[in-house]
Image: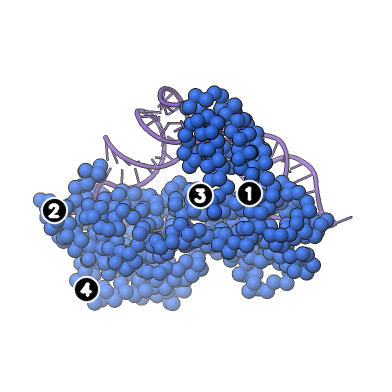
Chain colours: A blue, B purple
Amino acid sequence: MSSIIQTIQQAASRAMHTTYGVEIAAETIVIQETKKEFDGDFTLVVFPFARFRLGKPEIIGETLGRVLVELVPEIEDFNVIKGFLNLSLKADWWVSFFANAVQDEQYFTTNIGEGKTVVVEYCSPNTNKPLHLGHLRNIILGYSVTEILKANGYTAIPTCLFNDRGTNISKSMYSWQQDGNGDTPESTGLKGDKLVGKYYVDYSVKLAEEVAQLLDTGMDRKEAEKAAPSSQAIQEMLIKWEEGDPETRELWETMNGWVYEAYKDTFQRLGVEFQQFYYESKVYQRGRETVQEGLERGIFFKDDAGSVVVDNSDVKLDKKVLLRSNGTSLYITQDLAIAADKYNEFHMDKSIYVVGDEQNYHFQVLFAVLKKLQKPYAEGLFHLSYGMVDLPSGKMKSREGTTVDIDDLVEEVKQKAKEETQRLGKTEGMTEAELDQLYEVLGMGGLKYFLAKVDPKKRMLFNPEESVDLQGHTGPFIQYSSTRIASLVRKQAELDLPSYTAELALEDPLNEGERSLIKRLFQYKALLQEAAHTYNPALIANYAYELARDFNRFYQGPKILQAEKPNTSSFRFALSAFTGKALKEALSLLGIAVPDRM
RNA sequence: AGACCCAUAGUUUAACGGAAAAACGCUUGGCUUCGAACCAAGUAGAUGCGGGUUCAAAUCCUGCUGGGUCUUCCA
């Protein structure tokens, strides 16, 4: 069934042909939602027709409007303002649209991705510190994109890469060796990632001191950074690790183990689950094979120093080293191997990397290299790049320990949700366990929503005060609308209303609140598709807010369950219940749950 | 030095090349209740600056200014 919008486009195209004799492809005709300060449901933009020199847009609009009313039975009326032709559909059409939607079990899904597989890599931390606010934005994006793709019929596979070896973890290991006194998460009561992160910060502090001393002796900065004892120690440790030195490997396993254990908790609390994990330590060697292959095929070359290099100047990028002169691999080397691993395992059509925009260049290079190698998956690669999260105090730096830890943050918002809930006192009769669950859902909802509502590519400011706001354009606002609906559902069960069916005769005309709400629900599918095409969860987040606002207006209007006519009550109730489903669906795409009461 | 990204109300954010929209804040009004974490009303802008393309530019092109990132045999 073609949508009403396509119907109008096609009719308009025909009308322009018969009345003016001009050919305009239906799909090029712009139809948009009518702005709320004007009368109408959809607006056809007439300005572009001006190029046919047919006269004033107003006149064309009038003429076209008259023809469309004749041609399209769903259209009831029209008005023209400048070059905008506003069309109103018959109320009956909206009513029957809604009746169909209610019966449609597939209403909140599409099948545009059927038969296609997408691998989504996200989170991907260095295993030397706790996950922080930046990761949280990443996780919400990655999780949501995965869910949005699934809702559109794609097979979406969430994966996570652990950068589990190299200098970062070595710094924590070295510092622990020096000053750790055999501390463990158990002995200190610290979560494993925090303990390891503490030593990482300690290391940086110590290194800075050493460098400062060397600078005093007149050494220049670069030299000093290299010559510092701690720095030297890391180089040794890296070599020992590569050589498989048992003691080093054991410490590495142990400390990473602490971190994984802690991450598991955090992932669970956030509700994310990965289908596949990749470990830098397992693949970093294998990237070399790909590099070798490129070298043999003459796509890469060896420079004077003996390192393997690719020249990307043909695609407006620089030269890039792919393998060090000593034969060891680089960050990009391992990404070559992982890309291949993903393809071998999943034969995906698309592969998405959710990574911060500071790595834009890296991914340009990576994708360019894979294209040169003519890999079958090269065309489906996409870097979902997002902006950094800033704090009012400035940029987060994990080396300086100025990050906002996810676990701490969640506790903080949960506490705020608790205070607000208690202040409002609407939770009588709930058990301690239920209350705790509720605070968690609300706090998490507020936090996730705050991060999800901003366009991914934009840098965003995280103000701890505002982000845990519970009023206005927030997660709890939407959750609140949902609990109102849940409450209606409970009440309705006690009433004896006629059940809602498509045949139920409406005895009252559709009012403004009802109509706006149905129109908003009408947008769901198109929006879900757009979110999948643009990999943009913010579209869903903002839609959910608008839907909740429309519902609240409707709710504040004439009574739902106690309308004068029972059939009207049934209809309004069905509209509420369906809105509740839509809110729940939309929020679930963002990993946000809805409570029954709050 | 070069490349890329960003700049919208006091603040945080929206807006397929098509009528600049919300929230927070501030000022009011609405609970003898289908839940006031709500609703309604008021308040605020020549979309950083200058050109250009277009019937139409916050959006595209271009030159500035300001902020950020990258261009390392770091990850």
The label number, if any, that marks residue A454 in the structure image:
3
Q: Quadrant of residue A163?
A: bottom left
How far apart marks 3 and 4 lie (CA) works out to 45 Å
Type of amino acid under label 1: Lys
How far apart marks 3 and 1 lie (CA) works out to 24 Å
Q: Residue at x 22, y 66 (%)?
A: A285
The label number, if any, that marks residue A298 in the structure image:
2
Q: Is residue A410 above or below residue A214?
A: below
Determine if residue A487 is in view. Answer: no
SS under mark 2: loop
Q: Nearer the viewer, residue A52 or A556?
A: A52
Q: Nearer the viewer, residue A128 or A3?
A: A3
Of badges 1 and 4, nearer the viewer stands 1
Q: Report which residue position mark 1 lands on.
A: A519
Chain letter of the residue carrying label 1:
A
Q: Report which residue position mark 4 lands on.
A: A244
> x and y percent of residue A229 in the render?
24, 61
SS under mark 3: loop
Q: Residue at x 64, y 38 (%)?
A: A69
Contact? badges 2 and 3 (CB < 8 Å): no
Q: Nearer the viewer, residue A493 or A440?
A: A493
Contact? badges 1 and 4 (CB < 8 Å): no
> x and y percent of residue A476 in the render?
62, 57
Of mark 2 and mark 3, the one earlier in the sequence is: 2
Of mark 1 and mark 2, the one earlier in the sequence is: 2
Q: Residue at x 22, y 52 (%)?
A: A372
Q: Could you classify mark 3 by the number of other residues whose Cα lies within 10 Å: few (under 14), some (14-19), or many (20 or more)?
A: some
Q: Could you classify mark 2 by the number of other residues whose Cα lies within 10 Å: few (under 14), some (14-19), or many (20 or more)?
A: few
Callout 2 and callout 3 share a chain? yes
